[in-house]
Amino acid sequence: MATFSNDFLWGGDISATQIEGGWDEGGKSPVETDYMVGVTHETPFRYGFYRNPDGSEGTMQLYSGKLPKGAQMIIKEGYDYPNHKASDFYHHYKEDLALLAEMGFTALNLTMSWARIFPGGISQGINSEGVEYYRSVLSECKRLGMEPIVTLYKYDMPFFYVSEWGGWSNRRLIEEYVEFARVCLTEFKGLSHHWITFNELNILKLTMDTLPDVTAEDRQRFFEEAHNQLVASARVVRLAHAIDPDNLVGCMCAGLFGYGYTCDPNDQLKMQKYMQDAMFYYGDVMVRGAYPRFARRVWEENGVSLNVSAEDAADLMAGRVDFLPFSYYSSTCLTTHEIDASLVSGNASFSGVKNPYLASTPWGWEIDPVGFKIALHVLSDRYYDTPLLVVENGMGTLDRLEDDGSVHDPYRIEYLREHIRNMREAVKEGVNLIGYTMWSCIDLISAGTGEMRKRYGFIYVDAADDGSPQGSYKRYRKDSFHWYKGVCESNGEALAQAAP
Ligand code: BG6
């Protein structure tokens, strides 16, 4: 008997800032990553340069929101800005979408750049060139038989919202976002029935944990930002239903899962608390429409006071999601014990203790397909009636383009095969899952470092590994391309076929 339903969505993910390029074309205004130079995984935090009114310069770390008053971000001579050209999807999208359709994709999760649609905010009006660009992308997906899963927000709002408005802690951003969403939902009505309001909304917790020098003020700001995003998301869920009752709307969580390092109950308790803080605090609001009871503890421990007005509470309850999309790359181990420095995980994104049972990628991301199955069950147990959608699961690593244009990537096939195998078992065991989209189906710029060499795709993009804008930008099918085609075409049954 087939495991996956006939309408199960098989596909991949891409995101505007990481793949499109065309950063100053088509009327688009700059977004935060446009100001960020590339780094490597040894220096994990991306940063950009700013100039103060007195002419002095400084650097701001990506997503820290710490731009001094009056300072302006600048593009500095002599540095590469990897997101400016990215994979040049802006000019290659027809060719790229045709390749994805050739693989048998039935879905593509892509993100809209807010800065293409409303480059100057509501007051400056809609940029019709941006609307037409996305209309063309979405129509092409439809023509090729792929359902676009449209993620409305993935860190790509016009940058003046950060520099002049103070970012998401400013309540006025809720209205701006809702209006941006209204335009997308109206203009692209019928071109998609799957919408995701925010990408990895819970990543704010990770950002808070990994940024150095987080002050009490920063914590207060981060929690307000998350709250405002949750309210904005809930309002858009309702709006999407009003615009088209066939719309299904989700809000996405970054999959932050793991284990207590030892069977010391204190390690297990620490992990349980981590899950509450990193996942359920957000997921409960999205799915159940209210903060969980443990939220009080979270606020207290972070020294935060949050004003959840009656109107916000009503919005959250009325805007519960139809499905819960989540990403899964790796797992983490936490302990209350002193550990040797050599056991500390080298991965800034999933920091913790190295898991001795798992191999890892050259970037230190541990490979844990069984953890994926556990994650599916954890979310299914907690949010039983709400279907899950896996958006983003994949392996970023080095690939080599051979002289004959082939790319042999058995490691990626192995990673995906084991994850999909575990996912299949979870579905057989009762998990309610509507689709799987793999990150990232085409090579693109790493979010964490700005490198191109941390390649995830089924499709190789011939662009310089360090993210500088050099190369032919030609596309090549990797071995995993052919393998995944077999997976899509067999509705997830053919996993063991040999690579070509
Ligand atoms: C996900 C993000 O959390 O991680 C993606 O949504 C990102 O945008 C992915 O690319 C992998 O991270 P990185 O740093 O390897 O690009």
Image (spheres, grey):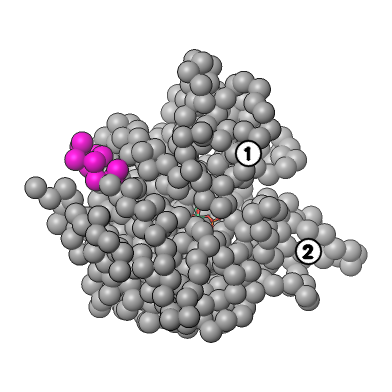
Residue 358 vertical placement versus 261 (above, below)? below
- Residue under numbered circle 2: 50
Who's the residue at 20% across and 37% down the image? 430
Q: Verify whether residue 423 appears in magenta.
A: yes
Rendering quarter of residue 103: bottom left
Circle 1 crowding by C-alpha within 10 Å: few under 14, some 14–19, many from 20: some
The amino acid beneath tag 1 is: Asp
Question: Is there a contact, CB below 8 Å, between mark 2 and mark 1?
Answer: no
Q: Verify whether residue 304 appears in magenta.
A: no
Closer to the camera in the image, 303 or 384: 384
In the image, 127: left or right of 148? right
- State the SS at label 2: strand
Q: Quadrant of the C terminus?
A: bottom left
Magenta span of residues: 422-431
Closer to the camera in the image, 490 or 496: 496
In the image, 160: left or right of 290? right
Rendering quarter of residue 451: bottom right
Q: Which mark is residue 303?
A: none
Who's the residue at 29% across and 43% down the image? 422
- Residue under numbered circle 1: 209
Who's the residue at 66% across and 71% down the image? 81
Closer to the camera in the image, 406 or 331: 406
Can the viewer see residue 70 in this picture? no
Residue 163 vertical placement versus 131 (above, below)? above
The amino acid beneath tag 2 is: Tyr
**Residue 315 rendering spot, x and y as whole percentages:** 41, 43
Residue 451 vertical placement versus 339 (above, below)? below
Q: Nearer the viewer, mark 2 or mark 1?
A: 1
Rendering quarter of residue 75: bottom right
- State the SS at label 1: helix
In the image, 289: left or right of 297? left
